[in-house]
Amino acid sequence: MLRRLGSVAGVWLALVLASPQAVALRCGTSLINVGDSRAEVLALCGEPAYRYEREVELILILGSAVERSRFLTVEEWLYNFGPNRFMVLMTFEADELRHIDRRGYGYSPGLASDPSCAGSGVRLGDTEGEVLLRCGEPDERDGYKETVSVQLDPLRKRREPVWVSEWVYHGGSTGLARLLVFRNNRLAEMRRADERDD
């Protein structure tokens, strides 16, 4: 009976670690868990390939008066373990690891596989770090902040910033420049750069 429970626990752990959103990740011989601090993750996993940080102000509003406001630092760390392993995106809120997401396969360090960013390997929902690893640095960058409101119930709404980054990759041999628009570190739009709204 004990042997069977051990097998079931092993299968459960394998499923948790293999799911797109996990609660634990193995870095070398150590296990990283949701709830760990940035310092713990850094000590066990090393420097991420890419870091994205934003400050979020959450404001609960009742009518037109501010009811409550608080600031929260959100960091996303992307780990690239090479072309034979999945990349991992870790999200920290304040100093606590909140999410571990398995992403697509990684890339060989320093080798952008699609420098014009014209291939089909870039997908909506990719992070800035994933696009940088695939396409390299963009030829042009611009950024700004928008504010969105979300209705929580008939009397309350939450207002928070959305950080928008616009990246342009000149077409290389295709001659067509591509515009990639990220919202809070997620690729939200892809189109030809000449369709850009100015």
Image (cartoon, rainbow, N blue to C red):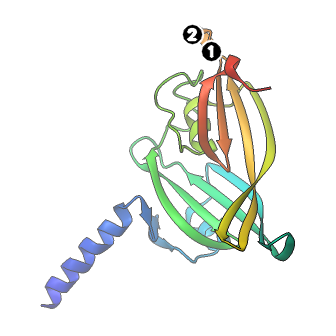
Q: Is residue 119 left or right of residue 38?
A: left
Crowdedness near tag 2: few (<14), some (14–19) or many (≥20) residues, C-alpha within 10 Å: few
Which quarter of the rendered picture does the C terminus lie within?
top right
Q: Tag 2, which secondary structure?
A: helix
In this rendered view, identify the residue nearer to me: 44 or 198.
Answer: 198
In this rendered view, identify the residue nearer to me: 94 or 67.
Answer: 67
Identified by mark 2, the residue type is Thr
Specify the farthest residue to the left.
1
Please identify the quarter of the rendering in which residue 74 is found. Answer: bottom right
Q: Residue at x 62, y 13 (%)?
A: 176
Q: Residue at x 58, y 70 (%)?
A: 98
Q: Is residue 82 left or right of residue 42?
A: left
Q: Residue at x 19, y 85 (%)?
A: 5
Crowdedness near tag 1: few (<14), some (14–19) or many (≥20) residues, C-alpha within 10 Å: some
Specify the farthest residue to the right.
65
Q: Position of residue 79 (x, y in %)?
A: 55, 53
Residue 25 lies, with reference to residue 119, above or below; the image says below
Residue tagged by mark 2? 174
In this rendered view, identify the residue nearer to me: 73 or 47.
Answer: 73
Residue 169 lies, with reference to residue 98, above or below; the image says above
- Mark identifier at residue 37: none
Does residue 42 show up?
A: no
Does residue 145 show up?
A: yes
Residue tagged by mark 1? 171
Q: Position of residue 28 (x, y in %)?
A: 46, 64
Q: Position of residue 27 (x, y in %)?
A: 48, 64
Q: Tag 1, which secondary structure?
A: loop
Residue 106 lies, with reference to residue 174, above or below; the image says below
Identified by mark 1, the residue type is Gly
Q: Position of residue 111 (x, y in %)?
A: 55, 31
The residues tagged by marks 2 and 1 sit, at their Cα atoms, a distance apart of 5 Å
Whether residues under marks 2 and 1 lie with C-beta atoms below 8 angstroms apart, the answer is yes
